[in-house]
Every structure is written in C-alpha cells, then in structure tokens.
Image (cartoon, coloured by chain):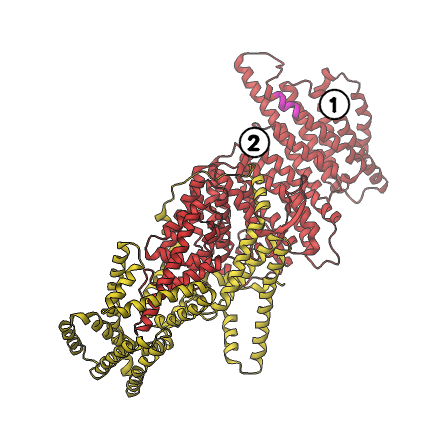
C-alpha cells in the first residue's frame, strides 16, 4: 500500500528533485515487468511450452491485481480501460495454455490414478444450493452486488448522462462495421416516418408500428407494463431529484445558479434539433410546433418554479379539454422538467464524493485478498 | 603383578574347555565363559581407572593381551552359540540368556570404547558374535512361536504351562536385550561417519529381523517408538549437515557424486525406518507427528535446493532417493490395515492445522534469505515456534500434494478428510511464501511420456494441478467423497483471489471434459443458478468486476461442454428475467461459446440479437427526432443500451 500511494503522489505532483526520479524508475520497473511477463507468455505458447506459458500468464494476472489502482474495480475507473484488455489477453493465454496442455497432462493424471482415460465422473451428488449460497465467498460477492444496487439510486442521473454519450459512439462504429444492418435500419426508420406522415394521428401510428416489432401478444403486454412502470419510476425520481436540486441550488451558488439554469434551459431545444440527422423538410414543420409548445411550458415552469401544485393544476385541464392531445400533453411536461434538471445534475454528481467513496470501497475489498499475497512481486526477477 | 598374574592364569585354562563334550558339560562351559566375560568387563573398567604407578613394561603387555582375551572370548562364544540353538530347554535357555546378556554388555563396552573399538581383534570378533547372537535369537523366537519346546522334566499340565510361559518370557527377554544392545551399537556406528559399515549393517539388519520375529512378544519389553526414532533422527541430522554445508555461496556447482555420497546414508536410515514402520504400524502411528516432521524437513530441503541453480544435482537426487522414502513412511501408515481409519484421518487433519491466513504474522515481511540460524532453528527438535511453522509452509504444501497424488489407494474416510482440507489448502496458496513457490519455482518430476520414466523439471503449479486432478478421479469413486468435492468446486469458484479462481476454472474444465452428460449438465446448472443471483447492472459494465471475471471463467468452462448443455444454459438465460439478461450480457462480453450452440438454437439467438438491436435503434432514433429522452429502464435488464452491448460483444466472438 505504501508503494502504491507513493507512486500516486509522485505521478500527481511531479515536484521536487527526488520524486521525479523515483517515480520514473518505479514506473519503468513495472513496465518492464509487465512486458517481460506478457511477452514471455506469448513466446512460451509459440515455443510449445504450455506449462511455462500458463505460469507466466498467471504471474501477469497476479501482477496486474497487485498493482490495481483506485478506480479499477468501480464502473467509473479510468485505468480499467487500459488494464482490462491486458487482463483479458492474459486470461486468454491461460485458457489457451490449459487446452494445449490438456492431452499430456490428463494422460499423466489418469496414469497416476491407475485408470483409463475416459468418462470417470458419473456420480451426481445432491448439491445443497442454499448451503453454497451461505458460504463466505459467495456471500461476500453477493453483498458487494447488493451494495451496487443500493448505490444505483443515488447515481442514476450521473449514469444516464454518462451512458447517453456511449451508445452514440457505438452506433457509429456499428454502422461502419455492418453496412447491411445500417441500410436495413435506415429503411425501417424511413418507413416509420412515412407512415407517421400519412396518418392524421401520429402517436397512434407509432404505437402500431412499435407493436409490429414484437411477435406475441404477451410481448406487447410486457412492453406496456414496462412503459407504465418506467413513467411512474421516473416521476418518483424527478421528485427526489427536485428535492436534491433545491438543496444544491440554495447552498453553493445562489443567484449564479439561477442564471445558469435559465441559460441551459433555453439552449436545450436547439441542441436537440441539431441532433436529428435524418429529419427532412416536411418533418421540420411538426418538430417546430412541438418545440414551440415545449418552450412555452418551459417558460411557465421557470416562472412558477417551486409551485408544483399550481403547475399540475394547469396541465390537467388541458388534458381534459383535449382528449386527442392527452398523450402529447403529458410527455412534454415530463420531458421539459427532466431536461432542465438533467442539464444541471451531472456536473454536481461527478464532482461529488459519492463516486470516489464507492470506488475506494470496492478497491479496499480487492486489496484485502489480493494485495497481501502479491505485494512482494519483486521476488520474481525476470 | 596381580593383574598380570590373572592374565597368565586364564590363558592356559581356556583351551582345556575345547575338549569337553558339548552336551554334557555345556552348561558348565557357559558358566566359565560367563565368568570370563564378566571378568573382562570388570577389567575394562579397571583399565579406565588405571594407575600411573604401574610399570611401563607391564602396561604394554597388558594392553596387548587384553584385546586378545576379549576377541578370544567372543570368538569362542560365537562358535558355541549354534550349539545352544539345538537344545531349547528352560534351564538351557536361562543359562544362555545370562551368558548372552553378559557378553552383549562386553561387546557394547568394547565397541564403544575409543581404544578397543578400533583394534583389529575386536573389530573382527564383535560382528561375528553379534551375527551369531542374532541367529540364536531368531531360532529362539521361531521356537517360541511354534511351541516346539522340549521339556527337560515332564510334570503335571499346570506345571508345564507355567514352564512354557517362563520359557517364552525368557526368550522375549533375550531378544529384547539383544535389540537394545544392537540399537546402541547401531547408533554408535551411525555417528561414526561411515567408517564402521559392517557393524552398521549387522546391527540394523539384526534389529529389523528380531523386531519382525519378536512381534507379539517384545512390545512390552522394547520401546519400538524410540527405536523408530533412532534412524529418523540420524537421517535428519545428516540432512541438516549436508544442507548447512551446501546452502552457502559455493565456489562451483555441486557434483552428483558428492550429493549421492551425502544422501545414500540418509536413504539407508530412512529405509530402515520404513521397514520397522511396516512391521509396527500402530507403534509408528503413535509418533506420527515425528514422521510428518521428517517428511516436512526433507521437503523443505528440496525446496531450498530447487531455488539454487548450483544445487540442481542435489535437487534431483533428493527427489530420486530421499523423497520417495519419506513419503513411503507416510504411505505405509496410510496403507496399513492395523491402523484405524480414525488414526489416518487424524494424521491428515494434522496438516495445515497451524495455518491461520487471518494471522497478521503470515502477511508480514518475509525474509527470503536462508541463513544458518534459520536452518538450525528449522532442524531443531523444538517445532512449536511460529517461525518454523511458517517457514515449513511450502513443505506442508508439498507433502499435502503427495497425499493428493496418493489418494487413489486411500480409504474413503481419508479421501473425504482430504477433501475438507482442500478449502484450507487453497487459502494457503494466497500466502506469499507458498504463492511465490508455486508460481516461481520448478521442481523435478517423473516424465510419463517415454516408456522409461526420467526426471524432468516442471513448474510447481503444473504439479499442483496434476495432483488436484488425480484427487478428483479418486474422489469420483465414492459418492460421499464426490458430494464433498462438488461443494468444494461450487464454493471456491467464488474465491476472491485470482489464483484460486484460475485453479478452480481448470478443475471445472477437467470435470466437464470427463463427466457424463447428465452429471455435467446437473452441476453446471447449479453453477449458473448461483451466478444469476450475483448479477447486477453495475458490475456487468465494469471489465474488472467480479461478475465479469466469473463470466469469463464460466465461458471457459462452457467451452468444454456439449452442445446440448450449452443450449440448455442459453435457454435458462433467456427467461425474460432481469438477472438472466444481465448474466447473459456478461457472458457475451466475455466470450460466450456461440459456435457451440446447436444449429436451430444458434439461428434463433442470432436473430434475437439483431432484432433487439434494430428495435433499439428505432426507438433511439424516434426519441431523438421528437425531442424525447429514452427511459433508463426501457429494457428489462435495467442497462442502458443493452442490445448494443450484446450485439457488439457477439460480433467479437463470431
């Protein structure tokens, strides 16, 4: 642990005459060890020494675990993106070595056991699955898993903001990798647009279109239930978020926060409009109308911020008076409210301490079992 | 003058005895020999306290004559002992007993005496006498067992039984005394550095044969446990001397000849211990801790030698000569029908007993440089020091590996006990000493490729995996043991240490490869039920999370399964539950064996992935066009972009 913290300090600061030298030397030593283990395993596999390759790959895995930095275990760890591929490659080397060694090794084992090579495991014991679930290792993992679930509530907005960027990138790469799929997807989207344009009631048409994607009635039912649950859940989240926003707004920033919020609110419609690559001229007209209506609602929301009762009352009459626009009336309201808060919440969450705490806690658990046994990796000169 | 006069007096008398008839005057003759022996003993004591005032001339003559008298006495005795074996009667046996006791004392004293022991006369006469004595005892023991007693005076039945008991008791007493004398002589010969090989061979050969023939009679009069400890102690001491001599910076590589010269005597003593152990397994079991310690010290030396390239010859010879003997000591106990299963289980339980992975001492700084102090401490008799226990951990690991390899011929109860120890055995792998030994060292092993096995060097890890697989095959012969092992497989796959996870993965692969379809399907279903319980949305997107590591291990295991089993797992994972979807995504990301699915199931799987992906794209595009933001729980798994991750991962594996 001392070594790791020292390395971290050296890497972060870089001040003083002694620290840079130590920092560079330590980093260089670790890099050389990493390379020697990595290349050693590859050479051993190619050289038809699966036993040696397996041991080297295992030592590499141990080295990576012993050098784990804070954040590797958590979802937001930045170093994981560098370590994970190396670890995956090492695991693949181990698996390849096991397969390469299986024939000779298994023959030796059967010879030692004085049995012919073949089917030997024929007894089916009655495994008490509940007993396994109560074992200490399984319980440790289960508690960690539940811990994640509990923390999910606190970081929902943060994850939404983070993940919204990810799929976009993946979409591009996927389209580039598979042209047919992209063409097919485009056709599907175009068909849906044409259908919606022809129809007098766009929302109904979309519902019908979505229904065609599922091949059984039960699926449609599930989708409906999921949508309802989603709406209800998010509504609850909004209330919770609003409360948090109130606290945050009052304490750290005051008037500046208000000004910033207004600015963000006004900017969001333009951005969303720009992010519609497949829209055409005819589609713009309905979009403009929607934006205009939402802008009005946003203005109302800003003016009457903090008066939830009044806002609700204002929305309900419209729905009652205009049955055909009921769905539309509900969605913009929800969306505008969420959009406002969505723009504010991520920076605060990211800068907050909850993420770091979660990460360090996870790392602590890992260190307990792995760090001790692999702390003295310098024992293996390469 | 008096001493000189006595010497002169005895010499002329001895030849007269040769003319006597053996049968008629044998007892009287023995009396004279006995007197001669006791006289020599007393004279020997006098010589130690000799007075300086004696004349030099008389001293020289005395020194010259005395060994001759002893040798003459022993030689005459040796020639007449065969006569005694032809007449087994109570009075004769009794007289012979007294006679032998006296002469054994003389022989002991002569050999142990620094001056007399090395003279030509005694060196020649003593072994002959000992050999004849051993033969006589063997004849007596055989006679006692077969009840071929000839009664000199037949009387009533009660009296005869009483006499027979006395006769057996006399024979047991003679045999016991002979054994004890042989032990003293053998110990002395052992510590003489190999200069008295003849005495060494005769004494230990006699000890073993008399112990064998005297079984059932001599246990009460002879402490067999202490006798077994003699060769073991000598072996350990010899090993300590060799280890201390070699574990210093050597000028050159240790030669095979030198190593062999050092190890052959140790092997001799271990072999003697094995022989006694096979005759008296119950007595040996009473000192099983000493037997274990002997094996541990030999394994410890083996580990020391393996770490030093200059001692490669020592490593190979130790593997060839000493380890088999020390393990044979343990094997003899384990194979013996005289030792109860409870005792055998107790021996297994003793292993790794003092290891506590939670003890901070075991995770502290470790000084890997072996020095004399550490060696001396390890080889000392005091074995309750924590440092010794810790230093011997790799040795305990090695000896335990031998038990795993030996499990095919162990009893069911012992196999079950070994299975329970596997959990602890796995934990000590995470301790630094054992960890560095397992992943950093190579050891000699027998190559099974050729018809004639030869010594090859392989990683300790390879030996570990082979031993565990051998144990799996042994456990599969017993339902109770296999049930215990199934628990081990399922519980320890969730071990937090990476090395344990890797080992368990390889054992699971071995199981899947050589299991019947029904058996493998059942157990892997249990595994995936457990994995589903652990699935969480957060961990599935973290590459270094426990869930992802388990998913990778599971994919490796599945790659050894049949298509039918993989189909079944796929069906289980697509039951529309959130946990199943999360686990399925983790498996896709870590290399789910799609190609192994059967044709129909695979087509359905691929179609489902594409359909989900297309549907997701449509939803995303629609929401973007209409200014909507996607609901975070739009998919049942609760993961944003689930279909995208799934399809992207599947592409990598295709």
Frontmost of labels 1 and 2 is 2
Q: Residue at x 41, y 60 (%)?
A: B646
Subunit of mark 1? Answer: B
Which disc, if any, is residue B80?
1
**A294, B165: nearer the viewer:** A294
Q: Which chain is red?
A: B
Subunit of mark 2? Answer: B
Mark 1: few/some/many CA within 10 Å (<14, 14-19, 20+): some
Q: Which residue is labeled 2 in the image?
A: B219
Q: Tell me where residue A41 appears, x and y as whole percent.
A: 60, 59
Residue B383 in view of the camera: yes
Quarter of the image that includes the N terminus of chain B: top right
Q: Which chain is yellow?
A: A
**A246, B481: nearer the viewer:** A246
Please tell me whether residue B618 is drawn above or below residue B224 in the rendered image: below
Task: Determine whether, in the image, residue A380 is placed left or right of residue A319.
Answer: right
Please tell me whether residue A175 is drawn above or below residue B336 in the rendered image: below
Q: Is B142 a magenta residue?
A: yes
Q: Tell me where residue A337 appears, x and y as whole percent.
A: 25, 76
Image quadrant assignment for residue B188: top right
Q: Which residues are magenta?
A: B138-143
């Amino acid at each position: 642990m001392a070594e790791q913290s020292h390395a971290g300090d050296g890497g972060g600061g870089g001040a003083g005459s002694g620290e840079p030298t130590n920092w560079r030397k330590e980093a260089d030593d670790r890099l050389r060890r990493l390379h020697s283990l990595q290349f050693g395993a590859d050479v051993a596999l190619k050289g038809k020494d699966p036993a040696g390759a397996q041991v080297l790959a295992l030592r590499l895995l141990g080295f990576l675990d012993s050098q784990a930095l804070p954040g590797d275990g958590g979802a937001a760890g930045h170093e994981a993106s560098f370590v994970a591929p190396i670890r995956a490659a090492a695991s693949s080397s181990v698996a390849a070595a096991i397969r390469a060694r299986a024939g000779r090794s298994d023959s030796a084992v059967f010879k030692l056991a004085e049995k012919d090579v073949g089917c030997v495991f024929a007894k089916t014991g009655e495994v008490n699955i509940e007993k396994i679930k109560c074992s200490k290792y399984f319980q440790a993992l289960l508690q960690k898993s539940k811990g994640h679930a509990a923390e999910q509530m606190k970081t929902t907005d943060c994850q939404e903001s983070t993940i919204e960027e990810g799929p976009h990138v993946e979409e591009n790469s996927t389209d580039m990798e598979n042209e047919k799929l992209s063409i097919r997807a485009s056709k599907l989207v175009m068909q849906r647009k044409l259908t919606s344009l022809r129809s007098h009631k766009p929302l109904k048409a979309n519902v019908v279109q979505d229904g065609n994607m599922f091949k059984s009635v039960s699926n449609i039912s599930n989708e409906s239930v999921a949508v309802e649950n989603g709406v209800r859940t998010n509504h609850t989240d909004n209330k919770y978020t609003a409360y948090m926003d109130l606290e945050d707004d009052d304490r750290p920033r005051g008037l500046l926060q208000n000004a910033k919020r207004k600015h963000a609110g006004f900017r969001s419609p333009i951005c969303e409009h720009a992010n519609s690559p497949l829209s055409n001229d005819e589609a713009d007209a309905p979009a403009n109308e929607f934006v205009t209506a939402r802008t009005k609602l946003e203005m109302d929301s800003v003016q009457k911020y903090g008066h939830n009762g009044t806002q609700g009352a204002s929305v309900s009459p419209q729905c009652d008076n205009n049955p055909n626009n009921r769905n539309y009336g509900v969605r913009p309201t929800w969306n505008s409210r969420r959009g406002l808060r969505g723009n504010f919440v991520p920076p605060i969450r990211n800068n907050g301490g909850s993420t770091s705490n979660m990460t360090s806690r996870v790392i602590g658990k890992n260190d307990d079992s792995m760090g001790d046994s692999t702390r003295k990796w310098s024992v293996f000169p390469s | 003058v008096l001493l000189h006069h006595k010497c002169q007096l005895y010499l002329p008398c001895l030849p007269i005895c040769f003319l006597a008839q053996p049968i008629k005057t044998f007892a009287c003759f023995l009396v004279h020999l006995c007197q001669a022996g006791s006289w020599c003993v007393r004279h020997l004591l006098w010589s130690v306290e000799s007075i300086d005032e004696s004349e030099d001339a008389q001293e020289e003559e005395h020194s010259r004559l005395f060994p001759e008298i002893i040798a003459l006495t022993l030689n005459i005795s040796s020639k007449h002992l065969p006569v005694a074996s032809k007449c087994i009667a109570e009075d004769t046996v009794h007289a012979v007993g007294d006679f032998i006791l006296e002469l054994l004392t003389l022989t002991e004293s002569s050999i142990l005496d620094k001056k007399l022991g090395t003279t030509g006369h005694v060196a020649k006469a003593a072994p002959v006498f000992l050999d004849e004595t051993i033969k006589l005892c063997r004849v007596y023991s055989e006679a006692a067992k077969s009840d071929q007693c000839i009664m000199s005076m037949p009387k009533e039945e009660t009296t005869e039984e009483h006499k027979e008991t006395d006769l057996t008791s006399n024979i047991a007493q003679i045999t016991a005394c002979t054994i004890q004398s042989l032990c003293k002589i053998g110990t002395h010969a052992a510590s003489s550095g190999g200069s008295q090989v003849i005495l060494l061979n005769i004494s230990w050969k006699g000890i073993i044969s008399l112990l064998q023939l005297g079984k059932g009679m001599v246990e009460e009069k002879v402490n067999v446990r202490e006798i077994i400890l003699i060769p073991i102690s000598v072996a350990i001491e010899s090993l300590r001397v060799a280890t201390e001599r070699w574990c210093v910076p050597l000028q050159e590589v240790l030669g095979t000849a030198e190593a062999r010269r050092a190890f052959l005597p140790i092997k001799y003593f271990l072999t003697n211990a094995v022989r006694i152990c096979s005759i008296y397994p119950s007595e040996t079991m009473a000192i099983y801790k000493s037997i274990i310690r002997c094996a541990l010290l030999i394994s410890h030396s083996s580990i020391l030698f393996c770490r030093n390239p200059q001692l490669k010859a020592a490593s190979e010879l130790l593997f060839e000569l000493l380890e088999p003997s020390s393990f044979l000591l343990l094997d003899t106990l384990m194979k013996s029908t005289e030792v109860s299963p409870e005792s055998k289980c107790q021996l297994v339980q003793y292993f790794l007993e003092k290891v506590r992975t939670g003890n901070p001492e075991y995770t502290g700084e470790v000084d890997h440089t072996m020095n004399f102090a550490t060696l001396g401490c390890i080889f000392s008799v005091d074995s309750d020091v924590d440092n010794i226990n810790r230093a011997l951990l790799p040795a305990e690991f090695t000896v335990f590996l031998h038990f795993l390899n030996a499990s095919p011929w162990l009893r069911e109860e012992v196999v079950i006990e070994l299975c329970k120890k596997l959990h602890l055995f796995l934990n000590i792998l995470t301790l630094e000493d054992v960890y560095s030994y397992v992943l950093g060292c190579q050891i000699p092993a027998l190559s099974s490729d050729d018809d004639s096995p030869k010594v090859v060097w392989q990683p300790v890890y390879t030996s570990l995996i082979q031993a565990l697989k051998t144990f799996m095959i042994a456990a599969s012969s017993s339902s109770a043991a296999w049930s215990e092992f199934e628990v081990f497989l399922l519980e320890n796959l969730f071990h937090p240490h990476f090395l344990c996870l890797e080992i368990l993965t390889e054992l699971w692969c071995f199981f899947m490869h050589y299991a019947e379809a029904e058996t493998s399907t059942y157990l892997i279903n249990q595994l995936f039920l457990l994995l589903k319980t652990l699935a969480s949305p957060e961990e599935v997107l973290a590459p270094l999370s426990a869930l992802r590591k388990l998913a990778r291990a599971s994919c490796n295991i599945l790659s050894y399964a049949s298509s039918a089993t993989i189909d079944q797992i796929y069906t289980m994972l697509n039951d529309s539950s959130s946990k199943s979807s999360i686990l399925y995504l983790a498996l896709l990301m870590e290399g789910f064996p799609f190609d192994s699915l059967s044709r129909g199931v695979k087509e359905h799987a691929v179609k489902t992935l594409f359909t989900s992906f297309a549907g997701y794209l449509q939803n995303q595009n629609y929401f973007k066009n209409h200014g909507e933001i996607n609901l975070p729980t739009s998919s049942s798994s609760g993961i944003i972009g689930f279909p995208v991750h799934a399809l992207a991962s599947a592409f990598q594996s295709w």
